Amino acid sequence: PKQEGAVVPGTSSVAGGGGAGGGMSRAAKKRLKKKQKEQKKKRNLSSKDDGSDHHGVRAAATSTAASSSSRSEKKRHKKKHHFPVHGSNDAGDEESNCDSHTSSGGRTFDDNQQMEIADISRGELEYLSSQGVNVAKAKKSDNSDKKKKSKKHKSKDVLELGDASLSDEDEKSESDGDDAEDDEKEEREILHTLSQSLTPSQVLFSGQIMEHEDSVERCKGELGEEGDTGSEIMRLQDSASDACRIVQDLTSTSRARVVFESLLAPSGVTAEEFYRDYWEKKPLLISKPKVTFKDDGKDSDAPFAAGAGAAISPSKPLEHRARLDNILSKEDIESMLAKCSLRYGREINVTRYADAGDGSGTKRRLTLDLPPKRIKRRGGSASDGDEEEEFQHVVADPKDVWTNFSNGCTVRLLCPHLHSDSTHSLLSSLELEFGCFVGSNAYLTPGGDAQGFAPHYDDIEAFVLQLEGRKRWKVYPPPNRAETLPRFSSRDYTEKDMEGTHPVIDTVLGPGDVLYMPRGWIHQAHTPQESRGEDQNGH
C-alpha cells in the first residue's frame, strides 16, 4: 500500500499528495514540463520527415525518453490508443504506441496507410489525422447507422399504432396501475362493508367475541339446540362471526379505519366525506335512525330519532343502543374510585353549573373539589432549620363523590383510559386513524335537568360518545372570525353572554349516538327535565 508523502518507484508524481519528506520540488516539476515540451516539438518535426527508419528509431527513442508518467498513466495511455491495424502480420501483438506511430511488431505507417478503430474520441482522431494516419470509422458508422435505423423503425411502428395501443412497457405499467387501483378499491369496499355490518364495540373487541363464539359452539354441541330463543341467539351470533373473523385478519391501520367508519355509520357519511366536509369545518350529528318496520303484519313506529328511513329489522335499534357497550360504564367508574386512588384536580373533578349565590342570579360553574393540602418538609441537611412547603392533591373519598353526585353534581374523570383497557383500545385505534394524540374525559351526570359546566368552547376536536342515559346538547358557532379554530379554550360564558345566539344543533343524544364538534364551537349540555327518574347519564 502507498504511504502518504512517499514517491512511487518508477514515477515522478507524488502519491497521497501534500505529505512532507518526499516528492518533487517546484523547480524539478518546471524542468520536467520544459523537457516534455521539447520532446513534443521533436516528435512534431520527425513526423514531417520522409518516414525513414532512423526517424522512426529517433521518434521511438524520444518517446521512450519521454515516458516519465506513472505506471497507471502509462497503462491507461496504451489502453486508450490501442487500435486494430489492417495488414498486421502479428495478430497476437495488440499494443501500439501512437506517439511513435509503430505497431508492436515494429511496422511504420505511410501517410496514405489506413487504420480502422472500434471506438475513438474526436481529440484522438484530430491528433492522428495531423500525424498523417487516415483513420477509418466504417464499422462504428455502420453500427450507429443500424442502431439509428432500428430506432427509427421502432419509433415509427409505435407512432403508427397511435392511440389504438401502447408499447409493451406502457401496457405493463398501465396494467400494474390498474391492478393496484382495483385492489385499493376492493379493499375500501371491504372495509366499508365491515363498518356497516359491525358496531364499534364489535370491531374493538372482535377477539373477545370470537372467543365467546367458540365457547357458545362448544355449549351448543354439548346441550343441543333447544327452543326458539336459543336458535335465534345462535343465528344472530353466526351473522357477526364471519365479519369478526375478517376484522381479526386486518392490519391495525385498516382496523382503525373500520372503527372510525363504524362510529360514523348511522349518519351515512364515509371517512373521506367526513374529512372533506366536516373536519375543522362544522359539527356532525350521528344519531340512530327512525324507521318503520312490520311486526306480525302491522306497522309500528320505532321511537327513535330521524334517520335515513330505510327499512331495517327490529333488532337494528337495539343494536344502535348497544353499539358503544363495553367502552365505559358507571360500574367501571365506581371501580376506579374504589381501587385507583383518584385525586381531586388530577384524575377527578366534581362540579355543577348553578346560581353563584352572590345575589345576581347568574349561573356559574362551581367546583366542589377539595383543595390540595400544604405539607411542610425539612430542606437541606438535618442541622438546617429551613422548611419547604409543597402541595399534595387529596385522594377523593368515594362516599363523598357519590353524595355530591346524588345532589346534582357532575363527576368528570380525567384520562380514564389510564385505568380502562377498553377505552385505551378505542383511543389507540383513533390515534392510528387521525395520526395524532387522542385523549379522553368521562362525564357522569345525574338525571333531572342537571348541568355540570358553563357554555364554552374547547381547543380540541371533540367527539361526544353517549354511552348511557340521555342528554340535551346545544352547539353554537364560533363567536367571531378570530376565534375560529382557536389555539386555547375559552372562558366560561354566562346566560347573558349567550342571549341572541341561536344554536345550530339542539338535540337529545341517547345511547349509541355520537356528536362531533370542531374546536371553537361553543356548546353546553344538561340532562332533560323528564329524565329525573333516571339514575345517571354518561358520556
Image (cartoon, rainbow, N blue to C red):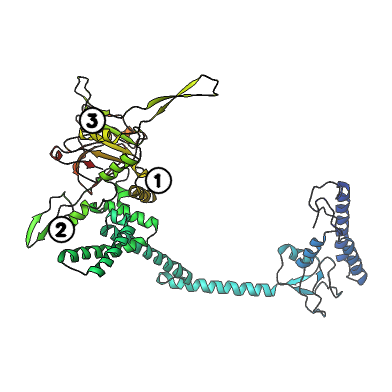
Mark 3 sits on what residue? 353
Mark 2 sits on what residue? 314
> How many residues crowd mark 2 within 10 Å: few (<14), some (14–19), many (20+)?
some
Q: Nearer the viewer, residue 396 or 180?
A: 396
Q: What amino acid type should be assigned to the residue bearing mark 3?
A: Tyr
Left or right: 158 in relation to 111: left
Place residue 376 in its image quadrant: top left
Q: Is residue 521 visible?
A: no
Left or right: 458 in relation to 123: left
- Quadrant of the snapshot with the N terminus: bottom right
Distance from label 2 to label 3 (Cα)? 39 Å
Label 1 sits on a secondary structure element that is: loop
Distance from label 3 to label 1 (Cα)? 32 Å
Label 3 sits on a secondary structure element that is: strand
Q: Position of residue 22 (x, y in %)?
A: 86, 49
Q: What amino acid type should be assigned to the residue bearing mark 2?
A: Pro
Q: Nearer the viewer, residue 59 or 341?
A: 341
- Residue that appears at 27% across and 55% down: 199
Q: What amino acid type should be assigned to the residue bearing mark 1?
A: Cys
Q: Nearer the viewer, residue 384 or 195?
A: 384
Residue 436: give its label. 1
Distance from label 1 to label 2 (Cα)? 38 Å
Q: Position of residue 338 (x, y in %)?
A: 31, 40
Residue 68's place in the image compared with 391, above or below, is below
